[in-house]
Amino acid sequence: MDVAKIVSAGSLPVTVLAVALSAQPSLAFSPGCPCGAVQGMHSQTRQHVSRETTETARQIVGALREHSGQNSRYLDRQVEAIKRIADGQEQNSSLRLRDRFRAEAESGRFDPNSDFCLLMDISGESGGNSLRSANGPRDVVRGASDWMSGAVVPVQEHGVKMAAYLAAEREELKNAGGAKDATTDWKLATGHPTIPLDDLRVQNALARLVSNTIDPFPSRPLTEQDLRTPAGLSEAARRRATEARNHAAMAAIELALELGNPVLPSDPYRRIAARSHYAADIPDMISELQRLDIRVASYDVPTEDTLEERHRKNERALLQDLIDIQSLSARLNFHRLQQESRNSVVLAAILGVMTDGTTTTLLSN
């Protein structure tokens, strides 16, 4: 076999070359063998094999990379698809919620309660409806107490001078507070939800009214000389019992005057009164009693417009109204409890008066 042809066929596979060499052993082992040519053929074969192996490896690596890239693109597309599906679900959910809340808003569920808004305005304007301190009722009770205890000059002088003083005072105060006879007519205090206690003439008239009701003609005060005698000491003990009963009566009257004492600005409550058929006069300052009267009237005698507005209220607004009504009821019950506690003391005093001077079969009177 011609070796030159074998060499020229450098692109033949290694196995083919090996077979060709083994078929001509004289070329491989004979003393006259061209060793340089054979080594050259082996070197070319190894280079060819190396190039083929490298190319094959490169192609395999490229194929793996391309496959990996395809997988990555597929995963990216899958993630993007899942993300778009989730975004679509959230958008659909948002649209459904928006439609539901729009329907509820159109139904009036979220409409503000006008009455509750008025109460919020009142709370902001009047500092939470906190009562202003006023001493009108205390001044009235103090004046009556001074008269009944004999701390004033007419009682100390007693007799005709005290009668003349009472007559002159009655004439002076007869028109106080619009009353025909302010010193004897309790309508001055009970005929109006707010008593004009900021008027000094009304205070003096009420002080006389309280005195005329409890003890119109007190006795002359006891002197130090009177208290040194047994009769004087006995009279002092009797008068202390009378004073205790008088103070029980004045405590009940003082609470009634405190409820009618003008202590709140009336401007915020005029807006509530306008929502009802409220007929009483509303002065610049109103009492705790008139404040409750106005708020109760807004539910008890509402105007036609107020009734129509109430008919359109949703459940939440009606619940706020119920809470407000319960609050009013609780406040009224608290004032009733205060008055009843004082009335209990008055009843005890009345019972004591009824049992004074009674006799028994055991002891002499």
Image (cartoon, rainbow, N blue to C red):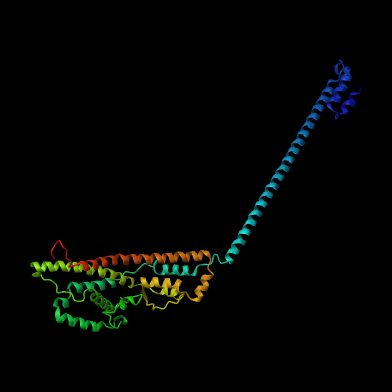
Q: Residue furthest front?
A: 361
Give the residue drawn at x 13%, y 69%: 235
User: Which residue is rendered at x = 22% and y = 68% of the image?
Assistant: 354
Does residue 190 lie above or below 319 as drawn?
A: below
Nearest the viewer among 76 and 62 is: 76
Q: Position of residue 259 (x, y in %)?
A: 33, 71
Q: Residue at x 43, y 73 (%)?
A: 297
Residue 290 versus residue 79 in the image, above or below: below
Residue 116 vs residue 48: left or right?
Answer: left
Q: Is residue 340 left or right of residue 299?
A: left
Q: Position of residue 96 (x, y in %)?
A: 63, 59
Q: Quadrant of the C terminus?
A: bottom left
Q: Give residue 8's quadrant in the image.
A: top right
* Count of marks overlaid on the render: 0
**Residue furthest toward the right?**
1
Q: Is residue 63 left or right of residue 258?
A: right
Left-right relation of 193 to 14: left
The N terminus is located in which quarter? top right
Q: Quadrant of residue 184?
A: bottom left
Tell me residue 130's x, y (percent): 36, 67
Choose between 204 and 12: the one closer to the eye.
Answer: 204
Residue 260 figure quarter: bottom left
Please tell me which residue lies in front, 88 or 13.
88
Name the residue at 17% across, 78% down. 154
User: Residue 88 at x, y = what percent?
Assistant: 66, 54
